[in-house]
C-alpha cells in the first residue's frame, strides 16, 4: 500500500512532526511504501530519524512564518496548492494523511480530500470560533478525521460523522533507565507560550537554593528562546538551567535523568510524558487540559494544579528529596506506555484503512 503524509514543515521539530516520522517509520517497517511530503522547509536537516525506506520530499524551500502579513500568508498557501495538486507522490498514493490544519486546508483546496484522512493533534478550542466552523466544514470532505482521545471525538460529534480515535504511537525506542542516582532534571518541548517554561523558571529559584547540586536541562527550540534565556539569567539560574536545543537521541537524555517536568498551560496529548515513561522516568506535570491526567491515571507521576507555580516548586522538591517515591513512580511507568505500543496502534490504522479504502490496496507491499 502507498501511504503519503502531507505536513506543513517536517523540519520544525515539534510533537506533530515527531509523530509523523514515527508513524512513517512504523508503516514502512510493516512493508508499506511510505512518503513524507513537507510543504515548507525551514531547516536544512530533519530533527528526527526516519527509516531509509521512507521517502522525504519538500515542495518548497520557503519557510512559512506566522509573522508574515495575512495576505502574504494566503498567497503563499495558494502557491503551494498547485504544488500539492501536481505532486506525483500524492497523486499515486492510495491514501494521504494530513498533519496539521494548514496541510489539511491545502489538500482540500487541491481537491484531494476524497482520498485523504485528516489528523487533528490540537485542542478543539485552539482556534477561534470562526476558524473552527471553517475547519469542521473542511473535515467533512475527508475520508475520516482522526483525533487522539474519545474526549476529542465527542467535541466533533455535533459537526461530523466520520471521526476515529487513534492515540499517538510511542515515538521512541526505549532505553534502560539509568538515572536513579542522577541529579539531572529534564524537560522537553517547544519554547512557546503554551509550554509554560516561563512558569517553570519562576518555580526554580527555591528549588536550587535548597538543592544546589541539581541541574535542569531543557530540550527544544522555539520563538521564546531569547526571552527565556534572559529570564533564566535574571532569576540567577544560569548555573542551574541549560537550554540544549533538539536532540536526535532524546531517549538517552531521558534515561540518564532523575525525573521529567512538564509545565504546559495546555496539551492535546503530551508526547513528553509518553517518552519519559517509556524510558522509565517519573514525571511532574501541571494537571492541564487535556492529556496529563489521562496519561498518568494509573501512576507514573505527580500532577500539580494548573499554572500553580508554588505547587510546582513543592512537587519538584518532593521528587528530588524522596528517592523511594521516584522509584515507585518509575515502576508504574509501563502502565502509561502500554496502550501506545506500535503493534496496537498499527492495527488501529490498518482497520481504518480497510474501512475507507478498497481492501485490495490495504495489502502490505
Image (spheres, rainbow, N blue to C red):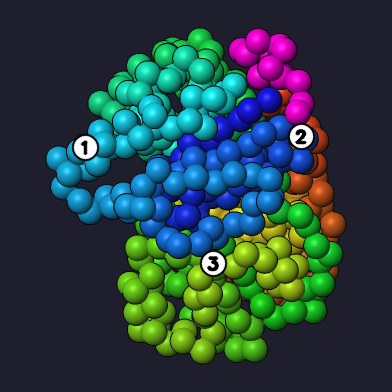
Question: Residue 130: horizontal and vertical position, in percent?
Answer: 25, 26
Q: Secondary structure at mark 3?
A: loop
In this orientation, does residue 293 appear?
no
Question: Which residue corresponds to the image point at 80% horizontal and 79% vertical from the top-left?
Answer: 181
Which numbered marker is on residue 74?
1
Q: Can you tell which of label 1 and label 3 is closer to the viewer?
A: 1
Residue 362 forms part of the magenta stretch: yes
Q: CA distance from mark 2 to mark 1?
A: 38 Å
Q: Are marks 2 and 1 in contact (CB under 8 Å)?
A: no
Q: Are marks 3 and 2 in contact (CB under 8 Å)?
A: no
299 or 344: nearer the eye? 344
Question: Residue 188: horizontal and vertical position, in percent?
Answer: 56, 62
Residue at mark 2: 31
Residue at mark 3: 246
Residue 132 forms part of the magenta stretch: no
In this orientation, does residue 74 appear?
yes
Q: Secondary structure at mark 1?
A: helix
**Residue numbers of the magenta segment:** 351-365
Q: Is residue 137 left or right of residue 321?
A: left
281 or 39: nearer the eye? 39
- Which quadrant of the figure has residue 361? top right
In the depicted structure, whether residue 287 falls above or below residue 244? above
Q: Earlier in the sequence, mark 3 or mark 2?
A: 2
Question: Which residue corresponds to the image point at 55% horizontal and 46% vertical from the top-left?
Answer: 56
Amino acid at each position: 500500500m502507498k501511504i503519503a503524509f502531507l505536513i506543513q514543515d517536517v523540519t520544525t521539530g515539534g510533537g506533530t512532526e515527531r509523530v509523523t516520522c514515527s508513524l512513517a517509520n512504523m508503516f514502512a517497517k510493516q512493508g508499506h511504501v511510505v512518503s513524507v511530503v513537507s510543504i515548507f522547509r525551514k531547516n536544512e536537516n530533519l530533527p528526527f530519524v526516519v527509516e531509509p525506506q521512507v521517502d522525504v520530499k519538500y515542495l518548497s524551500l520557503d519557510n512559512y512564518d506566522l509573522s508574515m502579513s495575512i495576505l502574504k500568508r494566503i498567497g503563499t498557501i495558494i502557491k503551494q496548492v498547485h504544488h500539492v495538486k501536481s505532486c506525483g507522490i500524492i497523486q499515486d498514493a492510495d491514501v494521504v494523511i494530513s498533519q496539521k490544519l494548514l496541510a489539511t486546508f491545502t489538500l482540500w483546496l487541491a481537491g484531494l480530500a476524497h482520498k485523504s484522512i485528516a489528523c487533528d493533534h490540537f485542542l478543539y478550542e485552539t482556534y477561534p470560533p470562526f476558524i473552527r466552523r471553517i475547519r469542521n466544514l473542511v473535515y467533512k470532505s475527508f475520508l475520516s478525521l482522526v483525533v487522539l482521545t474519545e474526549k476529542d471525538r465527542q467535541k466533533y460529534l455535533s459537526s461530523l460523522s466520520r471521526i476515529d480515535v487513534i492515540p499517538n504511537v510511542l515515538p521512541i525506542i526505549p532505553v534502560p533507565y539509568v538515572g536513579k542516582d542522577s541529579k539531572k532534571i529534564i524537560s522537553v518541548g517547544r519554547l512557546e507560550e503554551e509550554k509554560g517554561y516561563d512558569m517553570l523558571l519562576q518555580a526554580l529559584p527555591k528549588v536550587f537554593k535548597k538543592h544546589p547540586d541539581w541541574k535542569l536541562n531543557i530540550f527544544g527550540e522555539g520563538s521564546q528562546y531569547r526571552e527565556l534565556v534572559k529570564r533564566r539569567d535574571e532569576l540567577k539560574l544560569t548555573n542551574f538551567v541549560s537550554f540544549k536545543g533538539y536532540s536526535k537521541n532524546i531517549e538517552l537524555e531521558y534515561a540518564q535523568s532523575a525525573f521529567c517536568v512538564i509545565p504546559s498551560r495546555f496539551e492535546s496529548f503530551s508526547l513528553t510524558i509518553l517518552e519519559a515513561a517509556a524510558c522509565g522516568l517519573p514525571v511532574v506535570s501541571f494537571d492541564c487540559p487535556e492529556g496529563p491526567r489521562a496519561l498518568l491515571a494509573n501512576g507514573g507521576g505527580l500532577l500539580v494544579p494548573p499554572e500553580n507555580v508554588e505547587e510546582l516548586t513543592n512537587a519538584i522538591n518532593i521528587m528530588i528529596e524522596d528517592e523511594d517515591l521516584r522509584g515507585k513512580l518509575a515502576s508504574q511507568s509501563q502502565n502509561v506506555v502500554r496502550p501506545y505500543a506500535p503493534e496496537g496502534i498499527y492495527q488501529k490504522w490498518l482497520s481504518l484503512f480497510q474501512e475507507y479504502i478498497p481492501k485490495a490496496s490495504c495489502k502490505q507491499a
